Each structure stands twice: as structure tokens, then as C-alpha cells.
Image (cartoon, helix red, strand yellow):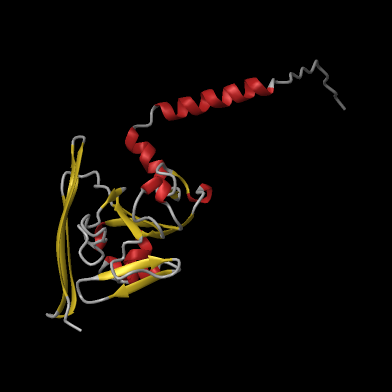
Amino acid sequence: MLLLAGPLSAAAQDPESEEETLDAALDAAFEDLSLSDEFELLEEEDVVVSATTHAQPIEESPSAIWVLTREEILASGYDNLLDLMRLVPGADVFLANQTHGAVGLRSGTTIAGDLLLVLVDGRDVALHLFGQPQWMAPPFDVESIERIEVIRGPASTLYGANALQGVVNIVTRRPDDVPLRVETTLAGQSPEHLRASVRAQGRLHRLGYWLSAGLLRRAPF
């Protein structure tokens, strides 16, 4: 039997130097990431922005928040924003006629539906004269929605008026990294119940664009 023996050396590394080494490695790894790469990394996580007006993981949100994903939106088969809100737990959906509806959270709603603030990409889209959300005629079609973030509970401290019951933030899709892409949708049960839309989107150098137009026709009650 042959035994080999030699000097052994062991060095204990300072915890602070370990942390500095880790930070340096992370900085080096992210140095080559472009802004678009960073957004792609964020998209892989369940990130919301409505509760605190800045991006954060949903599990760290201080508010009771519900996120309706794009997959759930497409799987529902709904063709309008008002029906999509029926998927939100605790939402009270009120349809007055074919052109007007209202949504409430936590103890109902009013006919005007002015107790719930509706945002599109963080901007208020209500009719300012009445404070009334455009549930039946939003400035986009269902296929343009990436996700819907719903805050249940008062949020007037952050968002001001009309956020008494909560906030609905509709996040639209970002353009694909192609010069031009055109999508069309045609659906309906009859000429009296028809939905048609067309979308054009893409990127030209550093400029991204998204254009959409649609028609929704429903038979009277």
C-alpha cells in the first residue's frame, strides 16, 4: 500500500469578501444585458405595478391583488372587457343595456360605476365628466390585452378619486420585435352578433407601435 502525504492548506474567506465577490459576478453578468433583455427577464416573473405604482413580484404586493393573465383571457372566449371582469373573484358586474355596464368590488356598485378606477397602462380612461369607466367601448380590443391587474380595496392615497373600491389596471401588449405584423379577428353567431378587429404592430429601430381598430355588434335585448 502506498500512502501519499503532503501539506494541506485551508483558508477561511471573510463573509464580506464573499458578498463583494458575488456582487461583482452579478454585475458582470448583467453588464451585457440590454434594456429589452431586462424587460424579458421581468416578464418571466409574476410582476405587478398597480399596488405601489412600481414593478414588484406579486407575492410582495402589500394589497389584495388579482391578476388575470393573457392565457386566461384568451381561454375565456369573452369578447369584451365587461365580461372579462366576471372572471375576477368578488366582482359585481352590472349590465344596463348593450352600451352601458358597471363593475363593483366589495359591496356592489352604482349605476354609474364610478367607485372603481380603471386604468390602461397606468392612465385613467374614464369619461371625466361623469368619472365613468368605458367598460363597453374601451380604446382597444380583447386581443390587445396582456394582463389585467385588480386591486381590491381603497386606493385613493395612490390614485386619487374614483378608487374607493379598488383599481383595475389593464396592461396592453408590447409590440413584437418585427418590422410589421398584422392580425385580424372575425367572430360571431349571426350578423346581429358580430365582432371584427384588425391590429398592426411592430418595431422600427427603437420605435415600437401598436394600432388596432374593431367593431362589436350585438343584438338588442
Where residue 72 sits, quadrant-wise, is: bottom left
Task: Point out residue 99 in the picture as x, y percentages from the top left corner.
Answer: 19, 72
Outermost residue, bottom direction? 221
Residue at coordinates 30% horizontally, 69% vertically from top-left?
A: 102
Q: Is residue 9 above or below residue 198?
A: above
Q: Is residue 196 left or right of residue 161?
A: left
Q: Residue at x 52, y 50 (%)?
A: 59
Task: Give the residue at the far top of this rendering.
Answer: 7
Q: Position of residue 45 (x, y in %)?
A: 45, 48
Q: Residue furthest right?
A: 1
Across and down, in percent, residue 122 comes to 31, 48
Does 171 sit left or right of 46 as displayed?
left
Q: Nearer the viewer, residue 202 or 119?
A: 119
Q: Tell which of 175 and 64 is nearer to you.
A: 64
Vertical side of 98 occupied by 134: above or below: above
Quadrant location of the N terminus? top right
Front residue of this view, candidates 136 and 105: 105
- Work out whether 184 lies above or below 30: below
> Which residue is at 24% across, 62% downward?
134
Q: Where does the image place residue 10, in percent across and percent down from the top left?
A: 76, 19
The residue at the point 38 percent across, 28 percent down is: 32
* Quarter placement of the C terminus: bottom left
Does 196 sit above or below residue 34? Answer: below
Based on the displayed image, in which of its 4 quarters is residue 189 positioned? bottom left
Instruction: State the count of labels.
Output: 0
